[in-house]
Image (cartoon, helix red, strand yellow):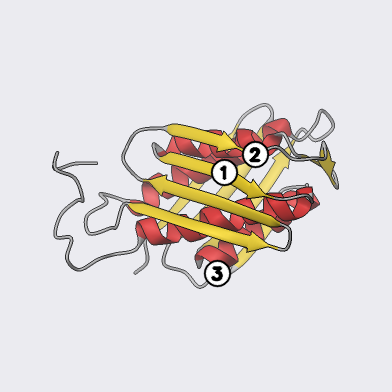
Amino acid sequence: MGRTAEVKRVTKETDIYMSLNLDGEGRSCVDTGIGFFNHMLEGFSKHGFFDLEVTIKGDLDVDGHHTVEDAGIVLGSAIKEAVGDKKGIKRYGYFILPMDDALALCAVDLCGRPYLQFDCDFPNDMTGSFDTSLVKEFFYAISYSAAMNIHIKMLSGENSHHMIEAVFKAFAKALDMAVSKDERIKDVLSTKGSL
């Protein structure tokens, strides 16, 4: 049986349902109300080999902020729940991902401590109906609710769509590495004995 989580979160701003399987095949069913954001979450699922189902009803009449930030909170919670006690996992993951003009680096540590280092400047304010400033908000929310370090750096890029997509895919690949098992790790990968 896979490492799975099912999370529901309802506020006055958003109503979110999410299911995540870390040991999946990259299947997704995503409806956030924001087309570009759907595309990014589908890419995260496919390239991390995570099965992901997401349904969000958000206050898009205001803007996309609450929808994207709250999705990050819920995804972080789902990652934390699905990874469980962290016994046997590699803990660390990293990836450098090219997408045409864009080259994105992502490194993660499932250490139990939240931290985001985000070094990306997107040339456009919007990609479709998606506010590009929300990429940072999304990953900040994940880092805190999953209690993980996330470092994201845009090494090069000119096209905002390519740059953001490279970030989401690099995160997927880094997370896939971090949650993968290593038979040499008998407990948790920490001298403290816990993560």
| Badge 1 density bin: few <14, some 14–19, many ≥20, Cα 10 Å | some
Q: Where residue 153 is drawn, which disc sits there?
A: 1
Report the mark closest to the observer, 1 or 3: 1
Query: Which x, y percent locates residue 153?
Result: 57, 43
The Cα–Cα distance between marks 3 and 2, rounded to whole angstroms, is 26 Å
Residue drawn 25% across the image and 66% down it: 182
Between 15 and 126, the one lying in front of the other is: 126
Q: Is residue 93 above or below residue 126?
A: below
Tell me which label, 2 or 1, sits earlier in the chain: 2
Element marked by disc 2: loop
Query: Which x, y percent locates residue 158?
Result: 78, 49
Q: Amino acid at mark 3?
A: Gly
Give the quadrant of the N terminus: bottom left
**Residue receiving disc 3:** 26
Residue drawn 36% across the image and 58% down it: 179
The Cα–Cα distance between marks 2 and 1, rounded to whole angstroms, is 6 Å
The Cα–Cα distance between marks 1 and 3, rounded to whole angstroms, is 24 Å
Residue 31 seen by the camera:
no
User: 30 left or right of 84?
Assistant: right
Tell me which label, 3 or 2, sits earlier in the chain: 3
Residue drawn 34% across the image and 63% down it: 180
**Residue receiving disc 2:** 120
| Badge 2 density bin: few <14, some 14–19, many ≥20, Cα 10 Å | some
User: Residues at badges 2 and 1 in contact (C-beta under 8 Å)?
Assistant: yes
